[in-house]
Amino acid sequence: MPAVIVLLVVLAIYALGYRYYSSYLARRVYALDPAYVTPAHRYSDGVDFVPTNKHIVFAHHFISIAGAAPIVGPAIAVFWGWLPALLWVVLGTVFAAGAHDFGALVVSLRHKARSIGTVARDVISTRARTLFLLIIYFLVTMVNAVFAVVIATLLVNNPEAVLPVLLTIPLAIGVGQYVYRKRTAALLPSLLALVIVYSAIWLGQHVPITVDPIANAVGLQPMTVWILLIFAYTFFASRLPVWVLLQPRDYINQQQMVLALLVIMLGVLIGWNTIAAPAVHDVPEGSPPWFPLLFITIACGAVSGFHSLVSSGTTAKQLNKESDARYVGYLGSLGEGTLALCSILAATAGVVALSATPAADWQARYADWETASDGALGTFTEGVAGFANNLGVPVAIGTVFAAVVVISFAATSLDTAVRLQRYIVQEIAEMVGLRAVARNLTLATAVALSLPIILALLPGDFAFGTLWQLFGTTNQLTAGLALAVIAVWVTRRRRNPIVILIPLVFLVTMTSWALLIQLHEFATSADPLEVFLLAPLDAIIFLLAVWLIIEAAVALRRAWAARAVEADAGEESAVRSGEHDDR
């Protein structure tokens, strides 16, 4: 199968989804009102609540949700074959992610741009808010641990990428200072910064940077040293005002995202590479079952609960008009679906683009689950390098380019997630009366980072094997619970919630099933880390989920009952009106 056919067909489906399905959601389900005064106007303060052009909001929203997950997940999941992975990405993006991201944004707009967890209190119950907050805490913990390992792995394996990645930090600070002080647009300075970063890729080939001397001096592995350095960086970065580092890094990464997608798509079009992977892979005996694990291995890129955290309470504070929610929310999910599509093509066609025996080489990379998951990052970066080579870019430069792109995306998500986890820790601490933690920025950040550091430093293949599945499960579970909030809200407004309920039921079923499978594996493992750390963690997440599902089901039943009462009252009123007319 030529990769270009898959690319063009999927992009056409996405275009149709935006043209027709998102229009249906906007009109019949969410009933967008262009005249509605958004929180950005109602509470405008020039800091958090700022009415913003929809194209700018889209760029910020897209770069916030598009981290490393839509790259790594699909690169692992093609282990079961490219067709199941592709179908889940396409159907999940069009019908689940679009409704989820779009809906979370609209519900937040109608609740003063509050987070989805806080909205759960208003829509479902006070207990639901507490439960949701705890589940979100575990989700962000997984995000921080996994993304730290992703970045560290790439830095260890690609020392040539260290220099351009490190250079991004002072350049972002410089761009932020310039934009803030000059009150000017960020496009030109961020493009200039990107040119400098990519120029440093060539220099990095001649000046590779490693932490081996530090690792040898302290008796640690280079991977461990990088993980500790990454968390040390996030400890300080998450305490800075957003305009100092976080926002200008977003400006630069927006340009990186566009460039990376263009390189991959043009490489596919020009190279006309063939997909070497089987449509359905005959996996070795003892491999994890694709059903239900495919649906949690690919989380971001199909549907992701993390997006509801970005849509609600963050993006919602910037929308100029409620009608912009369709463009930002639904199209943003299509953008991440496109990134996941590119990951599938890189892992099935680009990675063997220069091979004399592509099918055999692909089989060697995906010989078993451990090989596939451990090599996912390398598979993607080499796949992008293969496509870039079709454009005349040397493979070595293309590999470092891809590594810099993935590290940049992951670092952006990590910066945001650590900051978000600190907020959650402070909110939970306030709820339980720990004011010292709630009001102390340093202490709250330290508490927020403690569990992610422990998980990231676990030995073995936890990051891309066990921990990635647990991350995906928690992420999808959060998406299901966000959909539950949206479904109750839609039902209360006497609109048809069926397009919300279908992905809701599917996600809750798949994630609960996966949690039980993982719980059994952890509890019966010979590894004490799995028995005493991951098994209890899995059990806690599962119990919280069951409790919140029950709360949501009760709220949905009440909403249906209230809707029926209103309908009966309307009919009775109509009958009385008719009787009066007869008289």
Image (tube, grey):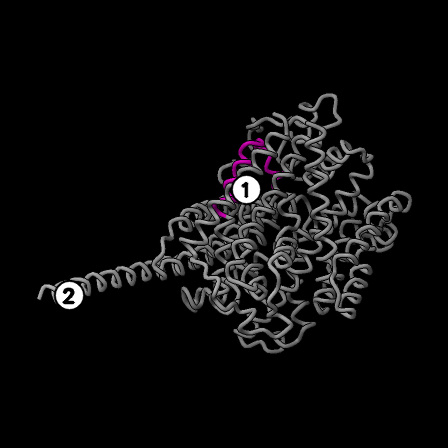
Which residue is under mark 2?
576
Q: Under tag 1, what secondary structure? A: helix
Crowd class of label 1 (few under 14; some 14 to 19; many from 20; radius 10 Å): some
Q: Earlier in the sequence, mark 2 or mark 1?
A: 1
| Percent coordinates x, y for residue 282 in the rendering | 56, 26
Q: Is residue 419 left or right of residue 205?
A: left
- Asked whether 37 falls inside the magenta stretch, the response is no
Q: Under tag 2, what secondary structure? A: helix
Which residue is under mark 1?
15
Answer above or below: position of 415 versus 400.
Answer: below
Name the residue located 39 percent from the left edge and 58 percent from the top edge: 490
* Amino acid at the residue labelled 1: Ala
Q: Nearer the viewer, residue 75 or 33?
A: 33
| Percent coordinates x, y for residue 116 in the rendering | 50, 62
Q: What are the residue bounds of the magenta stretch?
A: 73-96
| Percent coordinates x, y for residue 570 in the rendering | 23, 63
Tell me the quarter of the image containing the N terminus.
top right
Residue 235 image-quadrant placement: bottom right
- Asked whether 91 falls inside the magenta stretch, the response is yes
Residue 293, can we see it? no
| Percent coordinates x, y for residue 448 in the rendering | 64, 65
